[in-house]
């Protein structure tokens, strides 16, 4: 079909494909969430509803784009890792970035009431996003370690800060002053001696953030009954954004049927799971070598 005389303007659009053979990380971060969290009365230091809503939004993104193999979230941010050899939208930078970002944002608002119930969403939230390319597995591991160490540093500070304010009766200015220059061990000690809080007993979601991975589940069908086994179950805490049930909706799983060793028909399903594992050490990565291939 011949275009109009105006079609030449299309030539001003520049190619923007991502360097081949590199790992793509997309990081999304809430815009002005200090204000957003205040306006929506988030509990301090950690609003669990808000964190679960972030996990849900990230899960939607991961279910839509099968080339995302890992995600990590904390506070108002989420990072997504794409397969090194992804062919998603011919690796077009702006296409990938804008699609992931808009689906994340629309999912955040779509699922708002599932987590915040009667709390009114006062204005449409927005998120920023960037793509960073990493040349090798080392940088990918260090990237995710960086984000999780950041989670720990912020959460330890915020836990001590809000204990001083909420339980210790200090003003925010006094709390800042008391924590200024303190080392991690001193914050642990302050929490324990003054408030009886053992930091290591705080909800692992708050201490470690959320890790989204695809896990293989096998549905066996002996006769009429059906049961589920996690084929790659590994130690560590695990839940789903949707009430401890693995997400097995229509669009969110890649499944295929195989005949198991016992001759029973088995359906292999890869579903997105929310975990709170340590991703700084080796255990998580050694259990999932495919992430860094
Ligand atoms: P920017 O637009 O530059 O990202 P910002 O206001 O979003 O600015 P961030 O550094 O991204 O600032 O920090 C996000 C802020 O949102 C946190 O400091 C915290 O106040 C708040 N916040 C986000 N998630 C939660 C949560 N689950 N519980 C409590 N507070 C939260
Ligand atoms: P892509 O993801 O590549 O953009 P697409 O399916 O969105 O694919 P477009 O070329 O963007 O394709 O075309 C959008 C299509 O959406 C139109 O062809 C039309 O079928 C439909 N559409 C969009 N807006 C309207 C509307 N207001 N009324 C009726 N149909 C609409
Ligand atoms: Mg930001
Ligand atoms: Mg932010
Ligand atoms: Mg942030
Ligand atoms: Mg379109």
Image (spheres, rainbow, N blue to C red):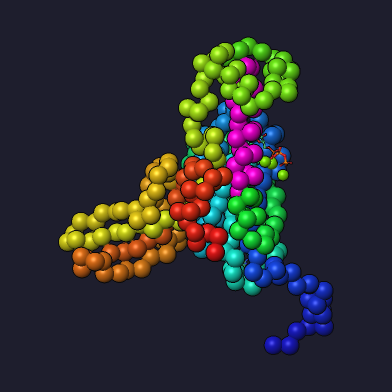
Horizontal and vertical percent position of residue 155: 60, 31
The residue lying furthest to the left in this view is 223
Horizontal and vertical percent position of residue 249: 40, 57
From the viewer's perspective, tell me whether residue 72 is left or right of residue 258: right
- The magenta segment is 144-165
For residue 112, say whether it is visible: no
Horizontal and vertical percent position of residue 250: 41, 61
For residue 263, say whether it is visible: yes
The answer to if 15 sits in the magenta stretch is no
User: Residue visible at 70% across and 17% down?
Assistant: 178
User: Residue visible at 58% across and 23% down?
Assistant: 188
The rendered magenta stretch, by its main secondary structure, is classed as helix
In the rendered image, the vertical position of residue 32 relative to residue 62, given as above or below: above
- Quadrant of the frame with the C terminus: bottom right
From the viewer's perspective, tell me whether residue 262 is left or right of residue 253: left
The quarter of the picture showing ligand 5: top right
User: Residue visible at 67% across and 59% down?
Assistant: 134
In the rendered image, the vertical position of residue 159 relative to residue 234, given as above or below: above
User: Residue visible at 60% across and 52% down?
Assistant: 141
The residue lying furthest to the bottom in this view is 2
């Amino acid at each position: 079909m011949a275009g109009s005389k105006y079609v030449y303007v299309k030539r001003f659009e520049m190619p923007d494909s991502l360097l081949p053979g590199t790992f793509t990380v997309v990081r999304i971060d809430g815009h002005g969430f200090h204000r957003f969290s205040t306006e929506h009365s988030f509990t301090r230091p950690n609003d669990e509803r808000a964190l679960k809503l972030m996990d849900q939004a990230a899960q939607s993104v991961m279910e839509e784009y099968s080339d995302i193999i890992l995600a990590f979230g904390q506070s108002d941010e989420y990072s997504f890792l794409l397969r090194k050899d992804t062919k998603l939208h011919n690796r077009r930078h702006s296409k990938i970035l804008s699609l992931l970002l808009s689906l994340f944002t629309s999912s955040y608002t779509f699922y708002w009431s599932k987590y915040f119930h009667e709390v009114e969403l006062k204005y449409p939230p927005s998120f920023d996003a960037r793509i960073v390319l990493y040349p090798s597995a080392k940088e990918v591991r260090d990237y995710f370690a960086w984000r999780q160490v950041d989670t720990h540093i912020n959460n330890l500070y915020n836990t001590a800060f809000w204990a001083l304010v909420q339980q210790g009766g200090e003003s925010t200015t006094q709390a800042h002053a008391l924590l200024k220059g303190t080392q991690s061990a001193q914050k642990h000690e302050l929490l324990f001696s003054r408030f009886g809080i053992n930091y290591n007993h705080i909800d692992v979601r708050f201490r470690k953030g959320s890790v989204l991975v695809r896990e293989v589940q096998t549905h066996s069908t002996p006769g009429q009954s059906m049961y589920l086994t996690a084929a790659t179950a590994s130690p560590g805490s695990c839940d789903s954004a949707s009430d401890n049930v693995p997400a097995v909706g229509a669009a969110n799983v890649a499944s295929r049927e195989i005949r198991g060793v016992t001759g029973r028909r088995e359906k292999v399903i890869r579903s997105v799971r929310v975990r709170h594992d340590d991703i700084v050490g080796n255990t998580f990565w050694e259990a999932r070598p495919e992430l860094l291939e």
